[in-house]
Amino acid sequence: MKFLKIVFSFIRMRFRAFALYPMGFIIEIVRGYVNVGIWFFIALFIQKSTSLNLQSISVNYVGYVVIGVIIFQNAEQLIKEPFNALSQSFWEKKLEIYQTSPLGIWGLVSGRFLFTFLFNGAIQFSIILITIPLLKIQIPGALNVFVFLLLYLLFIVSIFGLSLLGASTFFFLEVKQGREPISWSVNTMVRLFSGVYYPITIFPRYIRWIGKLFPHYYIMSAARSLLAIGKTANIPLITTVLLFFAIIFFFTGIFSLKRAINFAEKRSGMSALV
């Protein structure tokens, strides 16, 4: 209960920051729409000339790309948020204060992650409500939406674990600014090989396995199948794989960040010497 109070205190802090400076709130909303809109029009104009094998992707190419971009865009920001929270607090000389509480840093990274998930999720949901009629996607039924939401929850737990792994590099590798290697590597590999913009069937068989190493591939496959045509044949397999990713990444991320915090405490890694 105490931990939840700490988490929600950081969520309130983030919300108040947006309330005091609403332009940042507006820019984030516009950015979300613009990014999806760009790929919508790119896919719209090239779908007739594309030679991609679209038989296995369940929806037309425009719908395929929009669904992929919406899911990836949210995950891309979430996976970086705990590291960004640590970095910002470090340079603002607040990290030492948070560390005085046994749960302070954990509340910080969890609260920022949860706020970003809720905030970006609201934006992405509004985009989905607009794009569904534009793409003429027929949602097969409430059951499929419910199943997808359960799968998406497993996906978010996986992303949270990966984000903690990335946050641990803040202390282990002394990456105090810029991009940390975990989220950068994951986002780059997913963007290239996990079917965000094109089906992985365009790759030779000996390359396709790369995209399947990341949970993004499975949640995007589930979204395109469940929300577009109601296809459920692969859902048991996707559920098993996402559950595996959620367990492995979640506990690995917690262990890694815990070790990183202990490492920093021994080497005074909480102080910004500027």
Image (cartoon, rainbow, N blue to C red):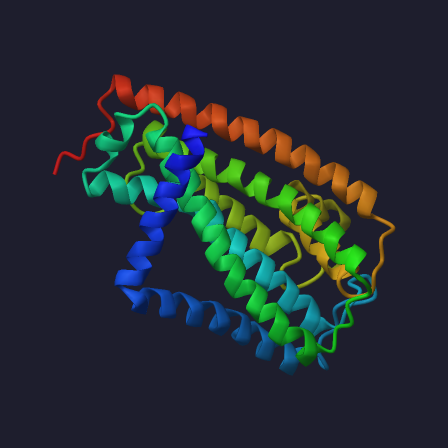
Q: Position of residue 117 (x, y in %)?
A: 50, 51
Instruction: Name which residue lies at 50% across and 30% down.
Output: 253
Left or right: where does residue 61 sit relative to residue 266?
right
Q: Position of residue 60 (x, y in %)?
A: 75, 73
* 161 versus 189 height, above or below: above
Left or right: where does residue 181 sit relative to residue 272?
right
Q: Position of residue 203 (x, y in %)?
A: 71, 55
Q: Kindly tell me whether residue 180 is visible in this rendering.
A: no
Q: Position of residue 161 (x, y in %)?
A: 53, 36
Query: Which quadrant holds residue 199?
Result: bottom right
Instruction: Name which residue lies at 63% across and 45% down.
Output: 153
In this orientation, which residue lies closer to the viewer: 207 or 133? 133
Residue extending farthest to the left is 274
Instruction: Name which residue lies at 70% across and 46% down.
Output: 151
Left or right: where does residue 101 sit relative to residue 140?
left
Instruction: Name which residue lies at 69% across and 40% down.
Output: 242
Residue extending farthest to the top is 266
Q: Kindly tell me whether residue 99 is visible in this rendering.
A: yes
Number of numbered markers: 0
Q: Where is the C terminus found, in terms of image quarters? A: top left
Left or right: where does residue 125 sit relative to residue 203?
left
In this orientation, which residue lies closer to the viewer: 209 or 195? 195
